[in-house]
Amino acid sequence: MSEADDDQTVNTPAAAARRPGPKLDVARNAKILDSALEVLAETGYDGMTIDMVAAHSGSARATVYRRWSTKADLVVDAVRHMSASDTAQLTLPDTGTLRGDLIAAVIPLSVEDQERRIKVLAGLATLAKTEPRLAGIGGGAGIEPWVDAARVLLQRSIDRGEYPGADVDTLARVMPMMSICRAAVQQQPITPEFTLSLIDSVILPAMRGAQLT
């Protein structure tokens, strides 16, 4: 039975018995969100439709609408999914130094992933006036997993006595926000060299500066 047929008979007892379980739902959602990112990168937000995402993912239109009633809802979750997928691969290192931890935590993305990310974030950056809900998504849901990871590493360096204290919440946002700016505004890849420069020229001096206050 096709997914479309399943959608049309979902209220029958037989169909209820065949409904996908939680694991299948999670896998299907991920496939739809990945497709949303692909379509968004290819067409931009204005050109994107839920029907296009359904076709790209091989899902029935009703399946997508049942999960996301508007395009904005779908895009918000897709960007959150993009960031969460990155950080899901991350095992927070403990090298003994903040610099070592930050360097080891960098995940090099493929060229294809970089290009998709740049197109997605650049497209969203143009929506500040027309779609207020999406205006801050790149700096909100799109970076929160990375902010959480940075916060852990910064606080750990303080806890082990490497630094006496700092504004961890603010500094945890610096690298993710500057990376988003580079991708969305400058439309440049987030290279290891760029990240290393942020660590050595921004984060570590800020942590050392906290020792003087």
Image (cartoon, rainbow, N blue to C red):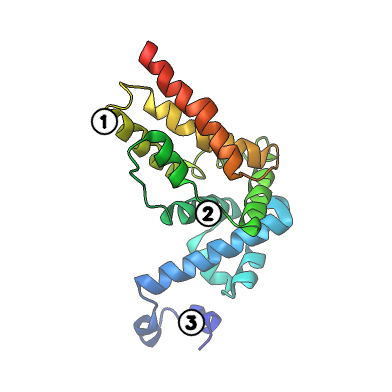
Residue under label 3:
6
Q: Position of residue 140 (x, y in %)?
A: 50, 39
**In terms of sequence position, does the residue under pointer 1 or pointer 3 come before the other?**
3
Which badge, 2 or 3, comes first in the chain's sequence? Answer: 3
In the rendered view, would you say 168 is above or below 92? above
Mark pair 2, 1: CA separation: 31 Å
Instruction: Say if residue 49 shows up in the picture.
Output: no
What whole-number distance in Å separates the C-alpha atoms at marks 1 and 3? 54 Å
Q: Looking at the picture, which amino acid does disc 1 mark?
A: Asp
Q: State whether residue 12 appears in this view.
A: yes
Which residue in the structure is indicated by mark 2?
Answer: 82
| Quadrant of the frame with the C terminus | top left
Above-or-below relation of 161 to 33: above
Residue drawn 42% across and 70% down?
25
**In front: mark 1 or mark 3?**
1
- For label 3, the crowd category at 10 Å Cα-Cα, with few meaning under 14, some 14 to 19 and many 20 or more, is some
**Residue 128: x percent and y percent?**
65, 36
| Distance (Cα) linking label 2 and label 3 | 28 Å
